[in-house]
Amino acid sequence: MNKNSTFAIWFSTARPKTLPLALASIIIGSALAYWAGKFDLITTLLAFITTILLQVLSNFANDYGDHVKGSDTAERIGPLRAIQHGAITGEQLKIAVIVLSALSFISGAALSFYAYEGIEDLLVFLGLGVISIVAAITYTVGKKAYGYLGLGDLFVLIFFGFVAVIGVFYLQAHSLPLIIFIPAFGCGLLSVAVLNINNLRDINQDRKAGKNTLIVRIGSKNGRIYHTILLALAVVSYLIFAILNFEHWYNYLFLLAVPLLVKHGLFVYRHQDPIELRPILGQMAGLALITNLLFSLGIFLG
């Protein structure tokens, strides 16, 4: 196997279409820090690196956990994973998970040591780093994998919304105004919407494999309604924050994404065949990034 093909295999296993989620949460948190007059570029860059490493770790661990449990079958609608056709072995993926866990901890520790102001901050963020690594792995790995218990949506909301956004804000501003929780909630909801597309697409396979995602539990029809609610609540969250804090028209640039979100939501609601959702996962990740970028741009312009 040549180097180019090896890189391509591992790059696809990292699922680059999901990486905008990691970037979006850091962009939002840093934009809010700028709004508070406390933006720090080094903290932002270290947070970017740490979050990307955690996202890739989660994707690798997800593939490994599903492989061990036998959840990835020939019926899978999504892109065929490298481990399914033997391009990567289970042992190789396990080693990659261990290496990425170490790199994530090192990067998170560097971020914590650079940005902390007191020993309490340092201990809390080192602890959060360890918890984030454990959460990234145990989504599908282990006997009590929470992804198989229908808790994936909750964990994505917590880590991509509150932990990432509020964490990077606090490491720059060293304060915790409650108003920050509103856009963090919106950012988390858009990340949950990406996971929801994945679960809607894979509902039949997940049901047969005993992977009881939220969609398996509530059904495809309710899952499509749930998707529109996620999108609507995300926009409302940003709008509430904007109304309470902004005065200029450019602070509302995120509203330009609303027609795209509406079009996407209507497509998901109207199409019941899971295979029709195959190209929509990347679209939802892109829409999440666009919405968050426009929201952040509105803040930076101010």
Image: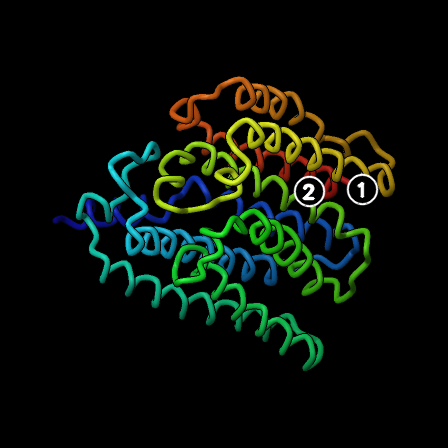
Q: Position of residue 244 (x, y in %)?
A: 87, 41
Q: Which mark is residue 66?
A: none
Residue found farthest to the left: 1
Please state which amino acid type lies under the numbered disc 1. Answer: Phe
Please state which of residues 30 and 73 is positioned toward the viewer in this rendering.
73
The answer to which image quadrant residue 263 occupies is: top right
Residue on which the image places disc 2:
186
Q: Are marks 2 and 1 in contact (CB under 8 Å)?
A: yes
Tell me the quarter of the image containing the C terminus: top right
Q: Would you call the spot at circle 1 few (<14 residues within 10 Å), some (14-19), or many (20 or more)? A: some
**Label 2 vs label 1, nearer the camera:** 2
Q: Position of residue 155 (x, y in %)?
A: 57, 54
> Is disc 2 placed on a helix, strand or loop?
helix
The answer to which image quadrant residue 282 occupies is: top left
Q: Is residue 2 left or right of residue 215?
A: left
Please state which of residues 219 and 243 is positioned toward the viewer in this rendering.
219
Q: Residue at point 61% right, 71% down?
A: 125
Q: Residue at point 48% right, 39% down?
A: 216
Please state which amino acid type lies under the numbered disc 2. Answer: Gly
Residue on which the image places disc 1:
241
Residue found farthest to the bottom: 119
